[in-house]
Amino acid sequence: MIDSTTFYRPKYAEIWAIEAVAAIILAPEPNNAGPPMPPLETQRLIIRDVQPADAGAMFAYMRHEPYWRDLPIEPPTAASVAAMIDARVQDQAREPRTSYFLAVADQTSGQIIGEAILTIRSTRWRQSEIGWAVSHDRTGQGIATEIGQALLDLAFDKLEQHRVYAQCRLENRASRQVMAKLGMREEAILRENVLARGAWWSSVQCAMLKTEYQLP
Ligand SMILES: CC(C)(COP(=O)(O)OP(=O)(O)OC[C@H]1O[C@@H](n2cnc3c(N)ncnc32)[C@H](O)[C@@H]1OP(=O)(O)O)[C@@H](O)C(=O)NCCC(=O)NCCS
């Protein structure tokens, strides 16, 4: 005779499966937008968290050789830029947040004309790395220097970093000049520390300490 206890007794594997499905259904949606970072405003720029919708505008300048020539990457494609931006958007939600990949927009036109990057390399010792890029049709106007100053302000003023450094390819004279204009001190030539597109590149590293930083 079949009674209510013998009719259906779930096995452990079934209970596990039901719980797993319930966990997926009941789990909160991942917050891909992350905690909002207030946009940074400079004289000419708005610097804000990148969003997936920025992929087209960023690919428009990243695809040109002056963008990638001195960067240790393969020439960007629309797909690689979209994937990179998706990954950086995921970073926005990480706790503690250590990665800031920011879109740089012209305040007047709203057009995206570059990027600003800050990565906290050591939360324990409050050490960050910064970087920048500007669309080739807007270079030579002091935009990277404006981005760099905003990143130093973010690092020292808001994120309470102790030391901020930047590296660029030895041959990247424009970026070296940006570091110098920002008041970052040259610390080292790193010999053949990067393997890019089949060749070893050397880098220049410059840094600024909190004690050397002055609010503009
Ligand atoms: C490097 C880069 C960010 C510079 O952007 P930018 O907006 O033109 O920079 P700025 O105008 O603020 O400053 C550039 C300085 O370099 C100088 N410069 C440019 N090309 C130079 C060269 N070949 N040799 C020497 N100096 C050069 C400019 O004259 C200017 O200095 P000045 O103001 O004293 O005259 C831009 O060229 C870029 O995006 N390159 C591709 C990405 C990249 O390499 N990013 C850096 C990775 S670390």
Image (cartoon, rainbow, N blue to C red):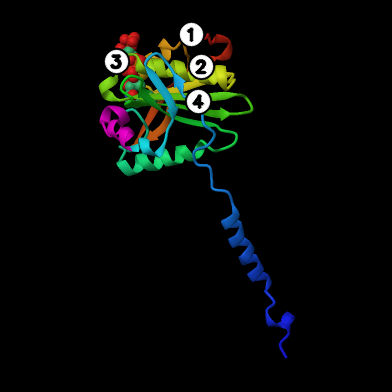
Label located before the other in sequence (4 or 2) = 4
Magenta residues, start to end: 56-69
The N terminus lies in quadrant: bottom right
Query: Eyeballing the image, is 35 above or below 158?
Result: below
Badge number at residue 216: 1
The spot of residue 2 in percent (x, y) is 71, 87
Between 56 and 203, the one nearer to me in the picture: 56
Dot 2: within a 10 Å radius of its alpha carbon, few (fewer than 14), some, or many (20 or more) residues? some
Q: Are marks 4 and 1 in contact (CB under 8 Å)?
A: no
The spot of residue 213 in percent (x, y) is 53, 11
Asked whether mark 1 and ligand 1 are closer than 8 Å, the reply comes as: no
Query: Eyeballing the image, is 5 above or below 52?
Result: below
Q: Amino acid at mark 4?
A: Pro
The extreme bottom residue here reads 1
Dot 3: within a 10 Å radius of its alpha carbon, few (fewer than 14), some, or many (20 or more) residues? few
Residue bearing the label numbered 2: 153
Q: CA distance from mark 3 to mark 2?
A: 22 Å
Q: Are marks 4 and 3 in contact (CB under 8 Å)?
A: no
The residue depicted at 74 percent of the width and 80 percent of the height is 5
- Residue 170's quadrant in the figure? top left
Considering the whole magenta stretch, tell me its main secondary structure: helix
Q: Amino acid at mark 1?
A: Pro
